[in-house]
Image: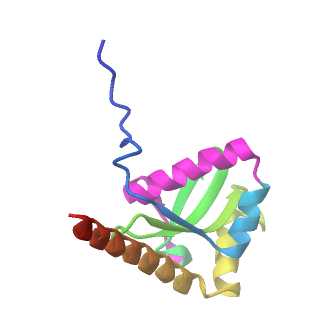
Amino acid sequence: MPEKPSGRPSHETQPRVRLGFAASAHDQFEKIPRHIREGLTRKLKDVALNPKIAKPLTGKLNGHFRVTYGRLRCVVRLTNEAPVLLVLVVAPRREGARDDAYQQALDALRADPRSEKLFAALVRAYLEEQRLAAFRRRNKE
């Protein structure tokens, strides 16, 4: 019986994904149990490869996206040009609470406006990595 395709590209054909974390998001991410962290990492990589599966946010978080994994919400910044994703917040959804994931994202953006520079640096690093890989492939031939 032939195997059904999983819908996911094989590991060999999947482009390399670059995930970045704002400082507060990294701390939040590290506090999550390991098995959940691994699943969330897979989901974030899937979103970086296919940005259409993330929900765009509106209002003050316009230009950012929501990624859900169980009860967790991640507020991320991503681009269609490269599989690069910057995580601003990882938090459980608590509607109306002061520590709501979306309120945390707004607070993080106000407290540390460097997230846009960090995101741009991630994209540049990824594109440079791809350029070098193509250069090495050409020189091997």
Which quadrant of the structure image shows residue 56? bottom left
Q: Which of 132 and 123 is in front in this view?
A: 132
* Residue 91 falls within the magenta-colored stretch: no
- Is residue 95 in sight in this rendering? no
Q: In this view, does 127 lie to the left or right of 103?
A: left
Q: Which of 125 and 107 is in front in this view?
A: 125
Place of residue 104 in the rendered image (x, y in percent of width and height, measured from the top left)? 70, 71
Residue at position x 76%, y 47% in the image: 33
From this view, report whether residue 123 is shown above or below residue 29: below
Which quadrant, please, contains the C terminus? bottom left
Place of residue 116 in the rendered image (x, y in percent of width and height, measured from the top left)? 53, 83
Residue at position x 36%, y 43% in the image: 9
From this view, report whether residue 57 is shown above or below residue 68: below
Q: Nearer the viewer, residue 3 or 73?
A: 3
Magenta stretch: dominant secondary structure: helix
Residue at position x 41%, y 44% in the image: 11
- Is residue 121 in sight in this rendering? yes
Place of residue 2 in the rendered image (x, y in percent of width and height, measured from the top left)? 29, 17
Q: Is residue 68 left or right of residue 135?
A: right
From this view, report whether residue 19 is shown above or below residue 62: above
Q: Which residue lies furthest to the top in this view?
A: 1
Q: Residue furthest front?
A: 140
Q: Which residue lies furthest to the left in this view?
A: 141
Place of residue 108 in the rendered image (x, y in percent of width and height, measured from the top left)? 68, 78
From this view, report whether residue 58 is shown above or below residue 10: below
Which quadrant, please, contains the N terminus? top left
- The residue segment tinted magenta is 32-59
